[in-house]
Structures are given as C-alpha cells and as structure tokens.
Image: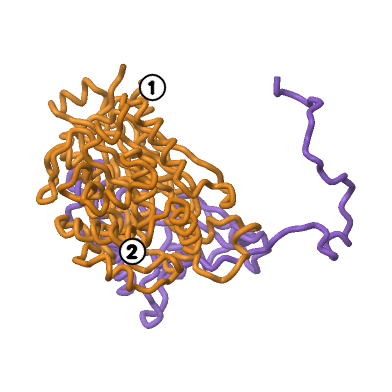
Chain colours: A purple, B orange
Amino acid sequence: MAVGKKDISAPPYVEGRELELEDFEEKKVTYVEDYPDIRYQFTAGQAISKFLNGLKEGKILATKCNKCRRVMVPPRTFCELCFKPADEWVEVRDTGTVETFSISYIDPDAKPLDEPEIVAVISIDGASPKMGILHKLGEIEPDRVYIGMKVKAVWKPESEREGMITDIKYWKPLEVE
Amino acid sequence: MVRVAVVGAGYSGFNANSPDLSWKEITYEAAVRAYEDAGINPRRDIDAVVTCAEDFWEGFAIFDEFCPDQLGGVLKPTFTVTADFLFGLANGVMLIKSGLAEIAVVEAHSKASDILTFGNVVKFAYDPVWLRPVGRGHPFYLAALEKSYYSNLRGYCDYTYAEVVAKNRKNGRLNPDAPYSADLTADDVLSSEPLFYPLRKLEIAERSDGAVVFVLAKGDIARELNPEPVWIDGVGWNSETSNYDTMSFTAVYAMKAAEMAYDMAGIENPAKEIDVAEVDDRFAYKEVQHIEALKLAKAGEVDELLESGYFGRKGEIPVNVSGGSLSVGNLLEATGAQKALEIVLQLRGEAGRRQVDAEIGVAQVWRYLPTATGAVAVFSR
C-alpha cells in the first residue's frame, strides 16, 4: 500500500519556492556548521613498528609464514590465511612491479591538483606474488606507465626520514628509457 | 527449538594502555585463545564472523573492511554491528537460530588509548543542531543531568553511588585483569572532585584497552565440542529515543531489553532466578538504575540492599563481581563483552578467586552517552 504517490496527511511544512542567491546570503537557508576537533594516535603495533623503523634505515621488511611459505608485505605478526603466528623477519628489495595504477587529477575535496598523481599498487621483489604496497610513481610521464612496469623506490635522504610510509618519496621506472 | 551455546571465549587485556600492540594484534590474541578454548580451527570451522565497532572510536571509517584477517575470517561471511558486543551476540544467536550458520564468532575490542580527544568523540554523538552547540562543558554533563533527575525521583543519596564504587573497585582486586581496582571507601568517593556536579570523578569509569572473542555454536555441535557448554538462553535489546528531553532517565531501555531476554529464557522471577549479574556501571548511578531495570530489586529499594551487602561478592545476587567497568575500565563497544565474559567464566567455574556459585547469570550493557539504548543476555550452565 505504501508504494507510489498517495494522498497522505503531512506535518505543516513551509510552503515551497525556488531558492535564490539571496536566501543563502541572508542565511534564510538554515544550517548549522560544526568543526569537531577529533584526533587519534594510532598504535602501530609489533609488526608495523618494526617495518616503519626499517624504512628509516632504507629497508623494506617482511614477515614469513613457514606453513604457506608466503613472504608478507606489509608485515604482520600472524598469517591471516593459516591463522598462525608469522615465523621470521626477512628483508625484501626496494624494487617491484606495477600491478595496477591510476592517474589522479583532483584532490579529496575535488580541487584540481597542480600535477596529476600516479597511484600504483606495487608488488615488491622478494615478497610473495601480488604482495606489496600502494604508493606513488614519479619521474615518469603519466602516459608512459603500464601494468608490469618495473620500478624502484626513491627514498628521502636519511636525515629526513621519520618512520612513515612517506619515507619512500615515490617509485620510479627501473629501466632507463 | 535450536539452542545456542558459547563454546569458546578468549580475551586480551584488560589494560589502561597498550602501546606495544595494535588493535589487530590485541584482537588476534583474543581470537587465538577463543579458538583454542573451543577446540576449533577457524579457517575450517567458522561459518560467520560478527564484529562490533563504532567508526569514531576506531578513528577510521567502514570498520567491517578491517575485521576478517585477525579473526581467521578471510573469505567468510562477515559484518560489523555498530553497537556493543551484546548486540553482536544477539546477531550471532540469530545467525545460528536461522540456520545460516552453525558456528559463529562474535568480537569486540577497545583501543580507547588511541583516542586523543575522547570528550570530543563523545560529544560528536550529540545532536549537531540541538545539543552540540550548547556550552563548552565536557559532554559527561549529560550523565550528571540524568543522575540528578534519577536520584531526586527515587530519593537515593550520593552515599549509595559511592558504595557502588567502593564495592566494584574492591571486587576488582580479585580480578587480575582489572587495572583500576582499588581498596577505597565510600568516603573516598564522596570526597573526590565533583567534575560534573553532582557527578564525582571516582563515580566515572576510566578507559581501558582489550578485546574479547566468543565462539557460538548450534546446540548439537556445541555438545560435541564441549559436553557442558554455557547456553545463551535469552537476548534482548531496546532503544528509547535520541531526544534527551523525552528519555526516561530510569533506564527503561534496559528494562525492555531485559523483558525481551527474560521472556526468551523463560525467566519469570529474575530476583529469585538470577544468581549473578554484570551490569553497566560506567557511571556509578547507572549500576543502580540497571539493577532496578533488570528487576533484581524493586525501584527505590536498591540503596538498602546495597548497604546490607545483598549485591556484594558474597551476597544474595552478586553484581559486578568482576569489578565492573569501574575496575576493569570503559572498554567502549567491548564493555558488554567483558560483562558476558565474566558471566561465562562464573558459570564455568573458571573465575578464580572471585568465583561465586551460579547457574544462571545475566549480562547487561548500555550504549553509553548520549544514548538510551541497551542490550541484555541471559546465560545458564
């Protein structure tokens, strides 16, 4: 019975008309703005702390599960597929392969970016297939990127690293064109 | 009728802080213990995963995306209930009773120590047009308003609430996982700072971190896994309204939720049939409200019973023998999980030095400020 337009009684709504610019200027269109101050400090934990400290030293660290033999990046203290603790830490290389990419032209607020950003998922050499990180590509024209492209990390100078995923500035093409 | 049992329980914590572990690692610990306890392999045996989380406690949106890995739930049916653990437990019961799952996992955790602006997150739950712009006070004032109204209505004096605090913080001293347990007196409570007069500092539960995982199973499977499982006899939940001016301020949400759970469990006289209760005490007056709402005492009579030790560890109906949230800490959406966990441990006879004699227990939780929402679960052995 509730489907479709029905002749039903309603509360006494204000009679409608089209909005004009002056309605906004005179704040006749009512709204309330709020800018909540909500902040967090995310505990990185055992695995990611070690990974982030590795970045400071210019290393990419992974954990290995000796049951399924996977070398896992980003590292975790447990293998989610075998549901058992990870067995050991291994260092992987700072080179990899572009698995997928996107060329982004606007920021989260939909404002144009000065330069397009190339975001890519990179499987890392030494880690198990399809394991790696989402990061940015640089030193390449957007129209030259392709899936399967070999890339290498470009690190911040050691003195500027702070144990963040952004200690790697971006990844650049490995082969010289 | 399909019965549902708790066949595994595991927890990690409870600690005032946990700078060494991420919330995923805490949850993994609890999950490993729960699966070990149940004697199952999660990758093979579990049919569904229910997690309980509120994005603003977590600090990131769409929490359900983050839940499978640490619970062994990759490529399994999972969902998140944006509410306390006891609501997730009710969903787990429904999954099994409906036949959609035979073994279901329910999880909740708190990483409250990651929140830097706790008061502002609480305030974020307040109506943005109607409540949030009013005043600059910490949002706990809403609890003080309720306490004031309720005390006036019932004629309870502050000494009653101070006794709740003293009882629970002392109870916690027998619980190795109660970081805020303390040997203090009602007078200590009454002389603590009235931060939100008439609400005093020691009447408010501090925050803590931890995780709880339950494994639920359908009756016949539960008996195979454990000849004497703890049964979930009833679940109930209820919401009054989001309008603070029309809320009852007498925890009608808890009364209605309890009636639903008692009805399902076939409990007719709770004060006679319930042996042990864990109720939400994140503000001390809430315990008194919830004792009334669960019908463990008549309205207006809780003060005398408390004073006589009726709700003490060795009393007629021990309430918050774990130490409650006043000792264990406010575990956010895992608050009801700690309460259900305590009931399960008590019914199993695994509560250590705080063990009481019990066959039927009830766990109750409120969804915290600014809500008039809550859930109840009845357990038996």
Q: Nearer the viewer, residue A105 or B267?
A: B267
- Locate residue B209, reporting x and y percent: 30, 58
Task: Determine the CA span between mark 2 and mark 1.
Answer: 39 Å
Q: Nearer the viewer, residue B143 or B52?
A: B143
Q: Callout 2 environment at 10 Å: few (<14), some (14 to 19), or many (20+)?
A: many
Q: Residue furthest left?
A: B353
Residue B368: assigned label = none
Query: Which SS class for mark 1?
Result: loop
Residue A77 appearing in the image: yes
- Answer above or below: position of B176 versus B96: below
- Answer above or below: position of B34 versus B200: above
Q: Quadrant of residue B86?
A: top left
What amino acid is at disc 1?
Ser
Q: Which residue is mark 1?
A: B98
Q: Which residue is mark 2?
A: B206
**How many numbered circles does the render carry?**
2
Residue at 23 percent across and 66 percent down: it is B185
